[in-house]
């Protein structure tokens, strides 16, 4: 049986989610990354809803069976009317809140949690609610996602320095990576937190059980972007050598 899973995000960030899905679930994947307008963390609600409609429309035309919204900023929205328009029921649609719920189920009750995310995600309060048991602290970043998208190593260093300083100064034990761009530098983060005992939580590693239960006959990955950048080749190396990458234009 063929299973097609569509994954969407602003730019390359969602490839961190594709990487984990691809490891565990046999399916035909279609990934759409809107690098032309990335990052989404500083966009208005109206802009985010417009972009969501365009991304879902694209995947609907690809006749995917399941949709994974790998954008934390979009996950803060109520996009129910868009899903209804395309007859996408809750059993076929997953967003990063679903992954975050599984993260919550797998950390200690006495953890000191920091939510590290874009401005839009922090301001929405969605993950503060998910992790309310832990009275989480928050640290917004308006720069890191774009820096990862563009390979800006200086800004990456500066933002990670800021994160490390905050974590160590406030006795944080667990950092929830609330932007899917951030796990793309997980090896660097792990190195910076080595010997501290601090755990960086990548929600993509906590796949909802409903997705894990899926199993198709073939595995493939098609990557589509609104702007081709070197970052795609870099991060696809960790997933598969056989991915096909195409550049398209999204229109309303």
Image (tube, grey):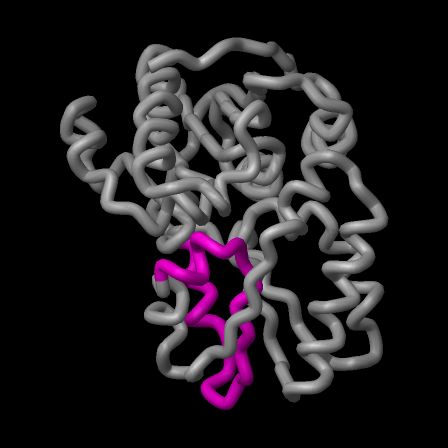
In the rendered structure, does residue 83 fall within the stretch colored magenta? Answer: no
In the rendered structure, does residue 116 fall within the stretch colored magenta? Answer: yes
Question: For the point 39% across and 24% down, which residue is it?
Answer: 55
Task: Tell me if I can see residue 101 in this picture.
Answer: no
Q: Nearer the viewer, residue 193 or 64?
A: 193
Quadrant (top left, top right, bottom left, bottom right) of the C terminus: top left
Q: Nearer the viewer, residue 134 or 49?
A: 49
Task: Tell me if I can see residue 164 in this picture.
Answer: yes
Question: For the point 76% across and 30% down, which residue is it?
Answer: 237
Question: For the point 69% across and 17% down, which residue is it?
Answer: 242
**Residue 127: percent from the left, percent from the top?**
40, 65
Over which residues does the magenta segment extend?
99-124
Question: For the point 64% across and 14% down, which residue is it?
Answer: 245
Above or below for 145 versus 102: above
- Image quadrant assignment for residue 192: bottom right
**Residue 179: percent from the left, percent from the top?**
54, 51
**Residue 120: percent from the left, percent from the top?**
44, 53
Above or below for 203 versus 181: below
Quadrant (top left, top right, bottom left, bottom right) of the N terminus: top left
Would residue 210 appear left or right of 249 to someone viewing this image?
Answer: left
Would residue 126 appear left or right of 85 to someone viewing this image?
Answer: right
């Amino acid at each position: 049986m063929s299973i097609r899973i569509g994954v969407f995000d602003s730019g390359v960030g969602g490839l961190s989610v594709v990487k984990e899905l691809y490891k565990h679930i046999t399916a035909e994947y279609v990934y759409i990354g809107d690098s032309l307008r990335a990052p989404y963390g500083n966009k208005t609600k109206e802009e985010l809803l417009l972009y969501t409609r365009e991304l879902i429309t694209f995947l609907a035309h690809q006749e995917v069976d399941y949709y994974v919204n790998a954008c934390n900023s979009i996950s803060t929205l109520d996009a129910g009317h868009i899903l209804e328009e395309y007859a996408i029921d809750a059993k076929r649609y997953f967003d990063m809140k679903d992954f975050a719920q599984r993260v919550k189920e797998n950390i200690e009750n006495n953890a000191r949690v920091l939510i590290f995310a874009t401005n839009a995600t922090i301001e929405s309060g969605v993950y503060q609610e998910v992790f309310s048991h832990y009275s989480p602290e928050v640290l917004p970043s308006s720069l890191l996602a774009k820096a990862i998208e563009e390979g800006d190593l200086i800004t990456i260093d500066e933002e990670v320095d800021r994160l490390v300083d905050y974590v160590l100064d406030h006795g944080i034990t667990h950092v929830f990576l609330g932007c899917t761009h951030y796990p793309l530098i997980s090896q660097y983060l792990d190195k910076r937190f080595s010997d501290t005992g601090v755990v960086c939580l990548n929600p993509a590693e906590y796949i909802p059980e409903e997705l894990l239960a899926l199993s198709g006959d073939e595995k493939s990955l098609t990557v589509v972007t609104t702007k081709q950048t070197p970052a795609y080749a870099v991060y696809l190396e960790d997933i598969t050598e056989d991915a096909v990458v195409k550049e398209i234009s999204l229109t309303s």
